[in-house]
Image (spheres, grey):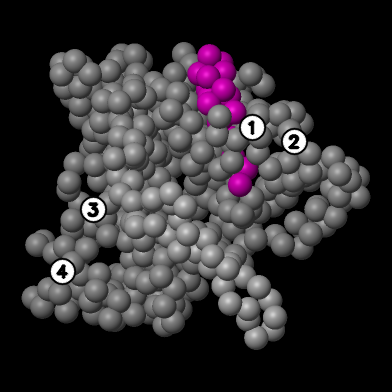
Amino acid sequence: MTAGTADLTRAPRSSSGAEGLSYTPAAMADHEPLFSKSARAMRFSAIRRMAALIERPGIISFAPGQPSPETFPVAAFRDIVNDIVDRESAAAFQYVLTRGVAALVEAVRHYAAAKGIAATADQTLITDGSQQGLDLVSRVLVDPGDVVLVELPSYIGAISAFRAAQARMVGVRLTEEGIDTEDLRRRHAEGRAAGRAVKFLYVVPSFQNPSGISHSVENRRQLMQAARELDLLVVEDDPYGDLYFEAAPRPTLKSIDSDGRVVYLSSFSKILAPGLRTAFLMGPEDILAKIEIAKQSANLCGSSLDQRIILACLTRGLIEEQKARIRPYYKAKCDALLQGLQAEGIPGLTWTKPAGGMFVWVTLPEGMDADKLLPVAVEEGVAYVAGASFFVDGTGADTLRLNFSKEDADRLREGARRLGRTIRAGHPRG
């Protein structure tokens, strides 16, 4: 045996007579020099890092951004899967085109058309969840050092995708009405003045993760006008747009895009179930063509079965039924959390009042740090996500995100009480 190789030796027979192999590894190698620059920049999601913590017995968790399993139409899924297997047999489990099952691409086009979005088949691509769409957009559009403009705060998954592409992320102020278009112009000008390519603006205009803020109709028009003036591409992420509590949805940016500068991503995860990893991406044909090639290097095709399930949900009208069912369900949960926060009456504590989606954004009394407060919260039996991770400029230490979709109304109110005790313990003057 040569020096430095592993030693594979036979292990003693077990009492049952079975024979195994034991592995004696060589000294642990340092693989750090092998990592790419993008790998060295990667960070674990603040939410995923908390997984073990938030699953502890007795914890009321506002942390995970997951829909309630009570909304999943399991019986309908069972019927659909049985029907697919009966009709298509082995074909339901075969490879499909990188763009997606052709019938699903057509169905998605009609689904988007109902939102005022016009897209051809060549402008539409099925992805394995919206996160894959963000990764593909980053790989196709971003070179190391390019500027990507994001909201302050912004979605952690998008930040991770842009960081992996080695983008230089620049934050743009977010107000209760939406993106601050004057700040957008300033940040764009600063990037250009520094000699950097400003590739696109990433926004979640409807019931944003993490803030719950939804851009007003007027703000959406102003944003698109600014994008035209700056000749700026806009990446619109719309996973929550159908979860509105008000009478009617606000128009997507893509639906008011008159010159083909919006790349639109959406998903069925929050409407149906996140285990069905089927989403879609729409945009200019030349960008979509490159994204299709990029997708082939990640996975040649998505899940044929998942896509056929989504197709059946669209053609049977199940998705529209789900929307009508879950909107009042989530509104009641949101109301319970807001009532609980209001009842605490803590001076200096503020929060957003979302008109849809799954999140409430809390700003702590002056001088408090949400990350440092988290161990106190856990002792009180409540968990949240500290807000600093959602900011790309180092701010946000006094903020936190609460998700109201997971817990029931009584636990949401109790969670608000526990959060109130936590804040008083960390800030006695409150």
- Give the class, few, some or many, for how many residues have Cα within 10 Å of label 3's Cα (few <14, many ≥20): many
**In the rendered structure, are the residues bearing label 3 and label 4 in contact, judged by CB atoms less than 8 Å apart?**
no
Q: Type of residue at label 2?
A: Tyr
Give the Cα distance between marks 4 and 1.
Answer: 55 Å
Give the Cα distance between marks 2 and 1.
Answer: 8 Å
Rendered location of residue 333, percent (x, y): 47, 66
- Vertical side of 177 occupied by 139: above or below: above
Q: Can the viewer see residue 97 in this picture?
A: yes
Q: How many marks?
A: 4
Earlier in the chain: of badge 2 and badge 3, it is 2
**In the rendered structure, are the residues bearing label 1 and label 3 in contact, judged by CB atoms less than 8 Å apart?**
no
Q: Secondary structure at mark 3?
A: helix
**In the rendered structure, are the residues bearing label 2 and label 1 in contact, judged by CB atoms less than 8 Å apart?**
yes
**To which residue does mark 4 refer?**
347
**To which residue does mark 1 refer?**
300
Tag nearer the camera, 3 or 4: 3
Q: Type of residue at label 4?
A: Pro
Q: Type of residue at label 1?
A: Leu
**To which residue does mark 3 refer?**
388
Residue 179 lies in quadrant: top left
Rendered location of residue 84, percent (x, y): 84, 47
Give the Cα distance between marks 2 and 4.
Answer: 58 Å
Q: Is residue 143 magenta?
A: no
| 234 displayed left or right of 171 | right
Tag nearer the camera, 1 or 3: 1
Which residues, given as a range, are shown in magenta?
A: 277-296
Earlier in the chain: of badge 2 and badge 1, it is 2
Tag nearer the camera, 4 or 1: 1
